[in-house]
Image (cartoon, grey):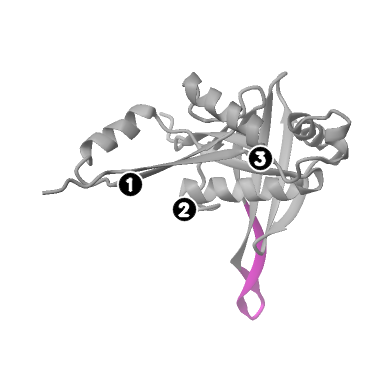
Amino acid sequence: MNTEPQQEYFITRYSLIPDRQIDLDTIAGKTKEDKFMDWLMTFPQEKRKETDYWGKNYTLYCKKISDDGFFMSFAKELHDIIGQKTDNGIIDKPIENYKKCHILLNIKHQWMVIEKNPSISKKIEGQKNIIAGVISKFLKPKNLHFEIGIMAEKNYFWEYVAANKDCITDIQITLTSPNFLEGIKTVNSFLDKTKETYNNTSVSIQTKKRRRTP
């Protein structure tokens, strides 16, 4: 009987957001997707990438597994204490310990499937923010910011709204380009048009429930 614990994953959509409207690469015709691919393709030579983020060391490994797919290992440094035997008794010895999560990356559809690991962060919201922050730090020399949005089932959203319709008075929705609400063409058209007109990367929509007058 297989007693190994089942690994849990959550699916996200990532966005590449330029820090500058124009740089030398943009003038040369290189897109933000081209820049990201160039960064991914440096892993075979460098083997791994390391950086410090909020006082912790993070290490990232990546290899290409298909035309559009990459497999990543994202590791966070933790400091543990082990007991070590000596002639005079047991002493505490600090050691470096890395906790990792695996990530499947698809560059065509811009999604990431991330393995849950509470050692990186207790909540998946925190885990995806850490991953996004670390990758953003790596991409900063390319004038790119990296954002990750958790993809939720649309039915769950509307079920929650229906169950709490008497309590909800305001709803604020942020749509990031590319829009993670895939399949709703009118929303994507709206985002494309606003991006073309104002060169923005995200749009916030807020609705407010009108209070009934007695």
Identify the residue under disc 2. 122
Q: Which residue is at a point 46% across and 50% down the rendered structure image?
A: 123
Of label 1 and label 3, which has the lower sequence position? 3
Of label 2 and label 3, which has the lower sequence position? 3
Q: Which residue is at a point 15% across and 48% down the rendered structure image?
A: 213
Quarter of the image with the N terminus is: top left
Q: Is residue 178 visible?
A: no
- In the rendered image, the residue lying farthest to the bottom is 88
Identify the residue under disc 3. 73
Q: Residue 45 versus residue 25: which sits nearer the camera?
A: 25
Local secondary structure at mark 1: strand
- In the rendered image, the residue lying farthest to the front is 213
Q: Which residue is at a point 80% across and 40% down the rendered structure image?
A: 22
Q: Residue 114 versus residue 6: which sits nearer the camera?
A: 114
Q: Can you give x and y, in whole percent of width and height, for residue 193 in the image?
A: 59, 27
Q: Is residue 211 visible?
A: yes
Query: In the picture provided, is 109 more to the left or to the right than 59?
Result: left
Q: Can you give x and y, in whole percent of width and height, for residue 51 in the image?
A: 74, 54
Residue 97, by quadrant, is bottom right
State the CA–CA distance, disc 2 to disc 1. Answer: 28 Å
Q: Residue 68 versus residue 191: which sits nearer the camera?
A: 191
Identify the residue under disc 1. 170
Provide the residue span drawn in magenta. 83-98
Q: Residue 11 versus residue 151: which sits nearer the camera?
A: 151
**Within 10 Å of the Cα at label 1, are there few (<14), some (14-19), or many (20+) other Cα atoms?**
few
Tag shown at residue 127: none
Q: Which residue is at a point 60% across and 37% down the rendered structure image?
A: 102
